[in-house]
Amino acid sequence: MKWTDVEEIAIQLSDAHEDVDPTQVNFVDLMNWVLALPEFDDDPGHCGERILEAVQQAWIDEVA
């Protein structure tokens, strides 16, 4: 998975952190959790605020 796989990242985060409200996650934790996903394989330097916002919104949509 790469940073551009926003929907898949959101699905995996939802599965890995079922008890977490995605609206309450800060970007530092969010980035670390994405990097820790087993299938994630991308450069942390390619991540920015816009990508993290997109991941967070996709996660919110996933659990809604």
Image (spheres, helix red, strand yellow):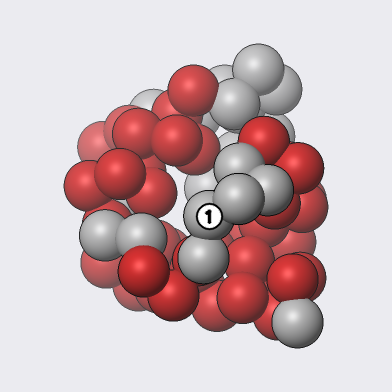
Residue drawn at x 36%, y 69% as measured from the top left:
24
On the image, the x and y values in percent for residue 20 come to: 53, 55
Under mark 1, the amino acid is Val
Residue drawn at x 49%, y 38% as measured from the top left:
34
On the image, the x and y values in percent for residue 49 come to: 27, 66
Quadrant into which the C terminus falls: bottom right
On the image, the x and y values in percent for residue 33 come to: 45, 35
For label 1, the crowd category at 10 Å Cα-Cα, with few meaning under 14, some 14 to 19 and many 20 or more, is few
Residue drawn at x 30%, y 44% as measured from the top left:
29
- Residue 12 lies, with reference to residue 26, above or below; the image says above
Q: Which residue is mark 1?
A: 20
- Residue 6 lies, with reference to residue 40, above or below; the image says below
Question: Quick check: 19 left or right of 52?
Answer: right
Front-lying residue, 63 or 34: 63
Q: Residue furthest top?
A: 38
User: Would you say residue 62 is visible in this rendering?
Assistant: yes
At mark 1, the secondary structure is loop
- Residue 39 lies, with reference to residue 31, above or below; the image says above
